Amino acid sequence: MTEHLSPLDIAFLAMEGNSNPLHLGAVATFAPSTPVHPARIAAVLCERAQEIPRLRQRARTSLLGGARWVEDPGFAPEDHVFTHHVRGRERFATLVSHLMAQSLDLARPPWELHVITGLAGGRFAVVAKLHHSLCDGMKAVGLGLQLFDPSRLSIPDAPAPTAKSIIPSMPSLRGIKDTFDIASSVLMNTRPPTLNSPVLTSSTRPRRVVMSRLDLAEVHRIRRTHGGTVNDVLLALVTGALRHWLSAHDSAAPSSVVRALIPVNQRSRSGDGSAGNSISGFLVALPVGEPDPVERLRNVRAQMESAKALGPDRGAGALPLLADKVPPLVHRLAAPVAARCAPLLFDTLVTSVPLPSVPLSLDGAGLCEMYPIAPVAPGHAVGVALSVYRSSVHVCLNTNQSWMSDAQWLDSVLRRELSSLQDARELVGLPR
């Protein structure tokens, strides 16, 4: 059965631009027991990619603006899998940044895999790129898991896609009211962009991918002390890091906030089995002007609890849900303009990608790290992505600001924030 792209998927296609490519990414590192040859890993990935139907398909558009997934008659997995060899952490980071800045070819299946050898300790990495029209974060994880070695993790078969009309169905009165409420909330929350803020930019300078790893046990200790969720603590750590950067530029006044769009997976709510996007979001004002790390965490936790109580299909953060109310042709015409308007609503994207906690491997090499990479909207200086895998938290920035591109600085400020919240444990009489 032919699967049409949803209006939101089409919007992601239409928003693609050379200076702001709209693909999701990930950097996975592996520790083999014996030296590996990159051609061997590439061959394994090609063999497995060949067996995933969606990776053999490309989007074919129609004159009315719609699009559907079709088999690419010239598909060869070898055209999407590449090998590289580098020496040193800095060259590795530079290569990852270069790869993520390059747009995907939308005339063929929109994905790439890059095998990188030469890492310290004999490790190798796989950099994955999947266009946002192909999948959201949850579906990207599902596709990626099919490339790993078989494990005790059970990957359920995706439900057969239902046929989707490219013309939106007639909404109910409740649906009209919900759409009106979201649109009204979006309009009320728009404001003129402040391009002199370091978190917004008109620059198209080359981007830099910066990665940092934290101990999950430390995050859990803070969560047990102050309440909330692991994601609340991680969002507070990101807020503290942004505060440090803004303070370095004299831009962290007591009332300063950074408005973050927090994507929310809607797939389990909608029962959507398609490979496309099923997302909403929360709009959260990160209190970067607040000097007390505990108060920042409490503020973030309160906002997240309020947003969850309201639900992901309410408020300005639910902007993605409006996409399915608009005909595809409108997206084709308006999406490029709408993409440049992102700073009117939010300053940065902070997304958390869920990963299974079981051991994973590729050709026998155990997975060590998994850093998701968020796309960056036009006018934004940074996108933040987080993932938890087993005992570690992986934090990744995708940025074009030179003062955000220092991996040592990222490590330093995140650990400083952790220490501040751990020190607060001692003040309430709890061991670190």
Image (cartoon, rainbow, N blue to C red):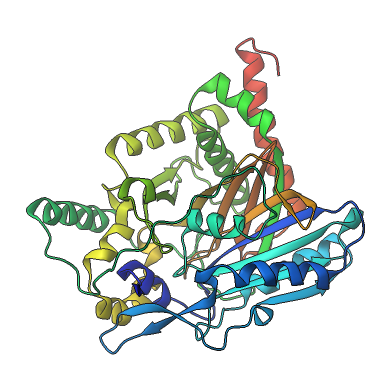
The residue lying furthest to the left in this view is 173
The image quarter containing residue 147 is: bottom right
Locate residue 373, reporting x and y percent.
60, 59
Kindly tell me whether residue 55 is visible in this rendering.
yes
Q: Which one is in front, 355 or 359?
A: 359
Q: Which one is in front, 34 or 102?
A: 34
The image quadrant where one finds the N terminus is: bottom left
Count the marks: how many?
0
Give the residue drawn at x 72%, y 49%. 369
Locate residue 119, reporting x and y percent.
86, 60
231 up-or-down from 355: above or below: above
Locate residue 417, reporting x and y percent.
65, 35
Give the residue drawn at x 25%, y 74%. 166
Give the residue drawn at x 19%, y 69%. 168
Give the residue drawn at x 31%, y 50%. 270
65 up-or-down from 401: above or below: below
The image quadrant where one finds the C terminus is: top right
11 up-or-down from 265: above or below: below
Does residue 137 appear to the left or right of 267 in the view shown? right
Locate residue 204, reporting x and y percent.
56, 76
Kindly tell me whether residue 349 is visible in this rendering.
no
Q: Which one is in front, 158 or 128?
A: 158
